[in-house]
Image (tube, rainbow, N blue to C red):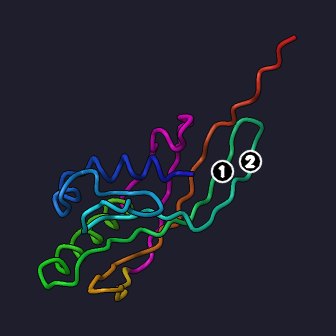
């Protein structure tokens, strides 16, 4: 799916990264145990791949993007700015997205639709802003090479 490409794309934005302690604060699925809040998480919650021609596959993904942070007034403002920036970046993205998987298939004709930002109270004084992004892209099919 596109999580690796999204991670690379979001980490390249200096405005978004400035809301976190480092550019390594964007994770796939969950933050590691030694990570320091705030962080941004990309969680794939669904998707499908449909072959649309002999050489192309359409990929539809649903990804939840969330920012977790301590529930202090300063951090809540930073968290809201961070999630709004991530949403802005994804809503205005068009074109190719480079490597979409570990084995470097290129996703092109990427189109992203984002939901409204939701806020959710967390556990032990944490807070979360999140939204859902539906991502449609096209990838080339890699056919196996048969040798005799």
Q: What is the chief secondary structure element of the magenta stretch?
A: loop
Question: On residue 58, which mark appears?
Answer: 1
Res 71 quadrant in image: bottom left
Residue at x-position 16% and y-position 58%: 18
Q: Is residue 120 above or below residue 14?
A: below
Can you say which quadrant of the picture contains the C terminus?
top right
Q: Is residue 121 above or below residue 109?
A: below
Q: How many marks?
A: 2
* Other residues around mark 1 within 10 Å, as few (<14) / some (14–19) / many (≥20): many
The answer to if 95 sits in the magenta stretch is yes
Please give left or right for residue 32 compared with residue 51 in the image.
Answer: left
Res 121 quadrant in image: bottom left
Residue at x-position 53% and y-position 38%: 106
Q: Is residue 110 above or below residue 121?
A: above
Please give left or right for residue 20 compared with residue 26 in the image.
Answer: left
Q: Is residue 31 above or below residue 75?
A: above
Separation of residues labelled 2 and 1 (CA atoms)? 6 Å
Q: Secondary structure at mark 1?
A: strand
Image location (x, y in percent) of residue 27 = 39, 57
Marks 2 and 1 close (CB-CB < 8 Å):
yes
Image location (x, y in percent) of residue 84 = 28, 71
Q: Secondary structure at mark 2?
A: loop
Q: Determine which residue is flagged by label 2.
A: 52
Q: Which residues are magenta?
A: 92-116
Please give left or right for residue 98 compared with residue 62 in the image.
Answer: left
């Amino acid at each position: 799916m596109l999580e690796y490409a999204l991670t690379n794309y979001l980490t390249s934005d200096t405005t978004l990264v400035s809301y976190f302690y480092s550019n390594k604060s964007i994770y796939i699925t969950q933050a590691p145990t030694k990570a320091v809040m705030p962080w941004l998480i990309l969680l794939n919650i669904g998707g499908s791949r449909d072959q649309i021609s002999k050489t192309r596959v359409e990929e539809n993904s649903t990804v939840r993007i969330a920012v977790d942070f301590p529930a202090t007034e300063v951090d809540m403002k930073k968290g809201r700015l961070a999630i709004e920036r991530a949403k802005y970046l994804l809503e205005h993205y068009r074109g190719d997205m480079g490597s979409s998987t570990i084995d470097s298939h290129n996703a092109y004709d990427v189109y992203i639709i984002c939901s409204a930002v939701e806020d959710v109270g967390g556990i032990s004084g944490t807070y979360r802003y999140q939204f859902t992004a539906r991502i449609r892209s096209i990838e080339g099919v890699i056919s196996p090479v048969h040798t005799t």
